[in-house]
Amino acid sequence: MRSTLYLKFTFIYIIFGFLSIFTVATLGSELVTSHLERNVGSELYKEANLIASDYLPAYFTESLSASDVQVQLNGMRTYLDADIWFTDSAGKMIRSSQRISSVVHPLEIENFNPAEVGSSQFLLGNYHNYFQEEMITVIAPVTEGFVTRGYLLIHKPYQYIADAKVNIILIMYMVLLVIYILSFSILFGVHFFVYRPLRKITEAAKQYASGNLEHEIHINTEDEIGYLSASLNYMSSQIRDMNDYEKKFIANVSHDFRSPLTSIKGYVNAMADGTIPVEMYEKYLKIILFETERLTDLTQDLLTLNEFDTKELLLDKNNFDIHEVIRNTAASFEGTCTAKKISIELIFASKTLNVYADKRKIQQVLYNLLDNAIKFSNPDSIVSVETTERFGKIFISVKDSGIGIPKKSLNQIWERFYKTDLSRGKDKKGTGLGLAIVKEIMKAHGENINVISTEGVGSEFIFSLPAQK
């Protein structure tokens, strides 16, 4: 990056300086010269016309003497620092005032043509080779009685324009130098506010690519670069958490698959080599069947969770009676409840209570919650399912009086494969995915599920559903 972006900015800055100097030296010089020529020529033309129209016509009416004209021309010479010629209409010199007394003016201008100025107000050059230096010349007619009787010519040295141009160009160079120095702050700002943060981001990208997700970008500016660095830091933390989760997930899946597979393999080998007698086959085949069911449940739960992870869950929402679903789900646990001497108590808000949701998914939620409640309830206890209606919502509660959930575990029970220490002794067949599935289904519905639990007293899970549409 040092050899590309930073050098590009430096190269552009240097090129900017050279182009600025070149522009001032060429285009700037030409524009200044053109402006000064027009400005000086215009001012001389105004002065010449002013004298030629207001003062000199009196000479041809003999109300103004030649000496008076000479005084006027001398004053103009001093004021304008120029050579002043007053001629008749044919170009014959009447009076003149020279800047340099030793320079003799012509008695008559050869090939005099007052129209040679054309559409311009001035002429540039040595004016018919009468001057040794370049001059800017203006010609103004002197009219008397609507007849052109003479002409006033003003010759000002072009060196005046050249000197003014040099002074202006020098000022322009000084201003350009100041601007160029000040513009260095732009390069300085790019270095500190763009290049250095980008270098940190580039280094972070290299670290992430090499697998170092612990690397952090320390940029705290509240701009696009700061937002980008914060996003990358957040991304790395999410990937890091995801990697940790994947490792934990794989470890849990491996453990939950390995345990039943080890049991199945051990019993099958023992039966195959005769360690287990034939009369004991029935007992151990039931154990193998139990472990197989564990593997089936775990596989099904993983497929269900994969459905949530790989795509947005498509819900088939309809209006249905939640009480009917609760009754049917509770009936499916009749055998289990009878064996454990547990009864399920249904407390309904009304005879029927319709909700708007995915019936099959909500039935799965109820099944998982009832399965946990029965599994962790003590014998001769009651599991209650209660419905209430408040604020346009239907609330369903599944409550048991079992072993309860430790306070420190309340926020972790929704994690995949998580089992509390209290549940590990009783939950032999559980996969640790039931509540994770419940949480995903409620999230897909845009609803909440909460738990209230006291260790040794019992647990109550409450979730909400929208009332029928």
Image: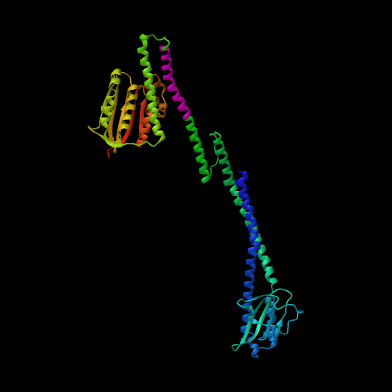
Residue 28 higher or lower than 298, as above or below: below
65 or 278: which is nearer to us? 278
Q: Is 254 part of what is drawn in magenta?
A: yes
Q: Look at 51% across and 46% down and name the residue there.
A: 224
89 or 403: which is nearer to us? 89
Q: Is residue 236 visible?
A: yes
Where's residue 271, x and y in %? 40, 12
Instruction: Place residue 350 in its image quadrant.
Output: top left
Where's residue 54, x and y in %? 61, 84
Q: Look at 45% across and 22% down and name the residue there.
A: 255
34 or 69: which is nearer to us? 34
* Residues drawn in magenta: 246-271
Q: Report the quarter where the C terminus lies.
A: top left
Residue 26 higher or lower than 375, as above or below: below
Where's residue 131, x and y in %? 73, 77
The image's colour scheme reads rainbow
Q: Residue furthest right?
A: 102
Instruction: Place residue 162 in its image quadrant.
Output: bottom right
Q: Is residue 428 visible?
A: no
Q: Report the quarter where the N terminus lies.
A: top right
Where's residue 107, x and y in %? 73, 85
Instruction: Place residue 283 in its image quadrant.
Output: top left
